[in-house]
Amino acid sequence: MMIVAAEPKPSAQAGSRLLSPSELESALRAIGARRYHNLHPFHRLLHGGKLSREQVRAWALNRYYYQATIPIKDASVLARMDDPGLRRIWRQRIVDHDGDGQGDGGVERWLRLTDGLGFPRHYVTSGKGLLPATRFAVEAYVHFVRERSLMEAIASSLTELFSPGIISERVSGMLANYDFVSPEILVYFGKRLTQAPRDADFALEYVKTNANTPELQRAVLDALTFKCDVLWSQLDALYFAYVEPRLLPPGAWEPGAEQVA
């Protein structure tokens, strides 16, 4: 019987020696290939048309909290930057999500999705129906970027390297499989197909240039792993509560009992 050695973890590899920029990028992309949440069973069901309307609604409601918190997270990163040039680049992320005015931006576009799925806006923005694990995961991400190094905060955003693929799968799969979904309510995703690669390219170049010790490279890889865990854990909570075994925690939105007053 042949015994094949296990593939070394990228963080362990980085800890042993300084990786070249291309090796660091390969290690980052390997994390996404193994850990990005497009691999989660909930997303497979969502994109394959296997969820009920109420399960899709649960996903949109809980995901709103993540989307609405992203500009808060980015403002925390921005506040830690001493370089005006770096701040000018990073602040575009906040504009992308908050918009330049009322009725603009990615958060508003996500609300069009929850509008189209029948949720009153005041209920969505109140956070009353969230799964506890959604709240804990999202707030853990905000605490991470506030408390860890700037390098780690920037590196944690690198899940955007992998988002164009999942967005394409999501839009095509949902439009093909759900008669209650239309292009108009999925408008959020179109903008992200250009915004996410722009942001990912910048963050990737930043860490490749500035993570210039094995310790910094290990921190970068671990930060991306942490962010993948944040996204994965949100889907774990949705699956457990709304798919199998359907055990809703107290206070969570309950399909069929419209707790939206």
Image (spheres, grey):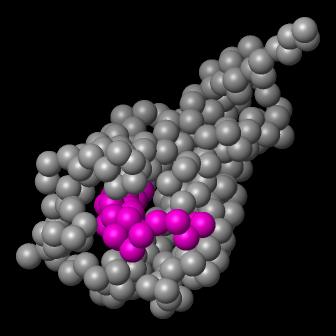
Residue at the farthest right position: 2
Return the residue nearer the eye: 79 or 251. Answer: 251
Which residue is found at the position 20% from the left and 46% from the top?
249
Which residue is found at the position 55% from the left and 50% from the top?
41
Q: Position of residue 214 (x, y in %)?
A: 69, 21
Q: Does 90 sit left or right of 214 as displayed?
A: left
Q: Does 82 sit left or right of 237 as displayed?
A: right
Magenta span dominant secondary structure: helix
Q: Position of residue 227 (x, y in %)?
A: 50, 42
Q: Does 173 sit left or right of 65 as displayed?
A: right
Q: Is residue 240 magenta?
A: no
Q: Is residue 65 magenta?
A: yes
Image quarter of the N terminus: top right
The answer to whether residue 83 is seen in the rendering is: no
Q: Position of residue 233 (x, y in %)?
A: 43, 42
Return the residue nearer the eye: 56 or 17. Answer: 56
Depicted 29 relative to depicted 251: above or below: above
Depicted 77 relative to depicted 47: above or below: above
Q: Position of residue 67 (x, y in %)?
A: 39, 64
The answer to whether residue 178 is seen in the rendering is: yes
Which residue is found at the position 52% from the left and 66% from the top?
50
Return the residue nearer the eye: 92 or 50. Answer: 50
Magenta segment boundaries in residue numbering: 47-74
Which residue is found at the position 47% from the left and 34% from the top?
149
